[in-house]
Image (spheres, rainbow, N blue to C red):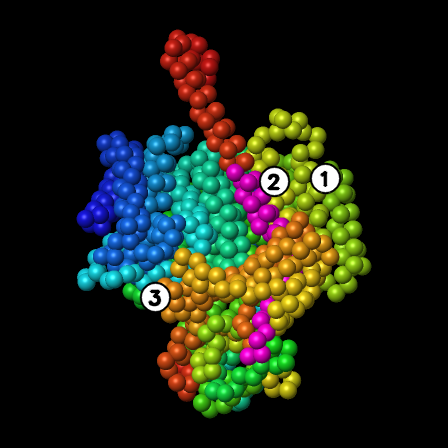
Amino acid sequence: MSTAVHASGMKPKHQRLVLLVIALAVLIGAGLLAAWALRNQASYFYVPSDIASQPPETGRAIRLGGMVQQGSIRRQADGVTIDFTVGDGAATVPVRFTGIVPDLFVEGSGVVAEGSLGPDGTFVATNLLAKHDENYMPRELQDMSDAQAKQVVAETE
Amino acid sequence: MIAELGLALLWLAASLALLQFASGLWALASGDGQMREQPAAAVRPAAVMQGVLAALSFCALMYLFVRTDLSVLLVASNSHSEKPFIFKLAGTWGNHEGSMLLWATVMGLAGALVALVERRLPENTIVATLAAQAFVSLGFYAFLLFSSNPFERLDPVPQDGAGLNPLLQDIGLAFHPPTLYLGYVGLSVAFSFAVGALVTNQVGPAFARAMRPWILGAWIFLTVGITAGSYWAYYELGWGGWWFWDPVENASLMPWLAATALLHSAGVLAARDALRTWTIMLGVVAFSMSMVGTFLVRSGILTSVHAFAVDPERGSFILVLLAIYIGGALTLFGLRAASIQEGKQFALVSREGALVFNNVMLTAILAIVLLGTLYPLVTEAFGTRVSIGPPYFNPVGAIFALPMMVVMAVGPLLRWRGDRAGRVAKPMILPALAVVAVLVAALVLAPGIGILPLLGLALAAGLAIASVMPLLGRNLRRTPLPVWGMVVAHLGLAVVVAGMASESAFSTERLVAADIGDSTTVGPWTIDLAAIDPVAGPNWTALQADLQASYAGGDPITLHPQSRTFTSPVQTTSESALATRWNGQLYAVLGVQGEDGRWQLRLWWKPFVPLIWLGGLLVAFGGALALVGRIASGWRRQSSMRRIAERREVNSLPQRRRAK
């Protein structure tokens, strides 16, 4: 930066250097802050067997991917909450979701649920991502759509 | 025939870009620093012709789409004969190849405009600028001709086209992509100016004044494009949110942040001849961000409604282009930065000081958004899939955005070069009182309010008042347009922040399963589900809810949210319904019918949410005022210089010396 601070007792060259150092320090600080926050706020992708072996802390935002198990979707009396299980062939996780489900959310198809693990081991989903059409689907589902659930595990490890 | 003609025009445009680049290079490459006249004379006409040819080529593609010529692969795979006319036309750029051709066309036309109107800078700077512009264009022509030919034929000819993604079949498609592209391309022109000035040692106020209208133009289009894209996502996706920190959204936000910093830094360079190197650096960064944006969207790295290309070859092609452009620009910058002379000095407390502070803040926010956008791509390369969302972007961005708002309030009141903090303390009393009043009021009336919405509301109130203070004591009729522009744009930002904070603090949501005849409430609204009816459009059928919504017991208004099923391709989308009042928006989405016959309804009451987009338009309007003001004063300057030159020719020698 070709700027100079006209403060008392400093030569122009020094002033310019001070300003450059401050600007760099702010940018490096922003980078470090970002790196720290990224590690803490990243929402990791789990499959049910990951949750069985290494469960994430309750309340931490994660994404859960897998197949909606046949016959598992159950609608609650309020009409807007559903319970279902997501499996990957090795393990299953119960999921609860309140909201309007995506159009292509059906039993036996792939789903990515965003949310966090509750204290009772139920995954509380705040958002469900299902395949929209051939051109637009969650990235994780692209690999899962035709593959069987076990391959999901192989892919993400 | 039209397809072949279009392709031929594209080849011609590419060869003219090559001519433009080569003659520019030849003209400037002489060792003694003198420009060769003959090759230099070819540069401007080549730029004009290149723009015209690219535009004609794009017109040929539009014609093919309007006629739904299914013998062309691109039309067959993206269009359908039964699509409404406006979407046939907009479908030209609703796909990978077409949007790349639009890029090249807009860039060619921008180059033509520079060649036609820019006469203020030394001729060798313009030649270098146009050569740099042609170099960037050449990359896009190569990409089009070698790996994304929009005019490729299809044999045998199919019965009908595959249709356009229904999410894109919206009036937004007609405006959103071209607007953003105009912004991206405007930044590429600013970059070309920076290269031209760097190569010919012309980094100074005259260069900043020539570059500024292009930055302003790009910045206005980016502002409008982001605002429109946000509103489009808000009502089209049916999720009730207006910004998702989706990588594609970030791809448009990053160039905007860089352009905002560049705009203010170029302002300092034009007015005070300070921040020379910093302005050039920001020019490089802004263009790099628009290229990163194009790369993220067009390479197929991201899967979203925006990502058309999934061909890895194309991804690598764009990556190579990106490396050449950014690497080349940074190398050139590294080689020539030492030759830029130091600009004028200024004190820490001064207009320049405030602008430098906010430039650094904007750059820090840019770095945070860039890191958050690229981090999932990096971890995925190592086999870990993560997603980064609002819990990262909102607080980390706010750490730098909130101090920026404070300095934004004070900065315009400071004098250039140096000032005393005490002089601006008095006018700041009123905004400071507003901040405190809003803080107290929000804590009393909404005790559970989050810290970010609270600070956002308070600072927005302070900034709104402070932003009009530069007009105090001025003769409003004599106030230059750029000053009005600054006031309006800063006020617009305060309005945006107020809308964001209000939406996040005061929104209420209601999710119900309702029978016909049932009544529900959300915020001050009472909503009755009166009926569900089937309706049909040109290429879709839908179930439409008839909602009777009354605000605080007033007369009911009707809302029609739909669940739409498109026929080509088959896909279901939710069409939300909105009711806008002066103090907010009611947002209704129709879900599915349960086994018990009840219909899912999702309703939001979002107080003051339209301020987000109104504020965005206000920001853009401020930019437009400044642009008009700058162009007008540029013309005045140019014509007065011409008059002086004429007078010199007419007058005799001694007088001429005196005129100097």
Q: Where, by quadrant of the figure, is residue B157 drawn?
A: bottom left
Query: Badges 2 and 3: C-beta atoms under 8 Å apart?
Result: no
Q: Which residue is mark 1?
A: B424
Instruction: Work out whether mark 1 precedes mark 2 in sequence or the reverse, and give the earlier one.
Output: 1
Residue B343 location in percent, x, y?
51, 39
- Element type where label 3 sits in the image: loop
Q: Residue at x 54, y 43 (%)?
A: B620
Asked where in the image residue B428 lies, by quadrant, the reply is top right
Do the CB atoms of the residues marked 1 and 2 lie less than 8 Å apart? no
Exactly how many numbered labels are in the figure?
3
Residue located beneath label 3 in the image: B310
For the residue marked with disc 1, what is the amino acid?
Answer: Val
The answer to whether residue A149 shows anywhere in this view is: yes
Mark 2 or mark 3: name the one nearer the start of the chain: 3
Q: Is residue B205 left or right of residue A80?
A: left
Could you say where residue B631 lies in the image, as x and y percent from the top left?
48, 31
The boundaries of the magenta stretch are B595-624
Looking at the image, tell me whether mark 1 or mark 3 is earlier in sequence order: 3
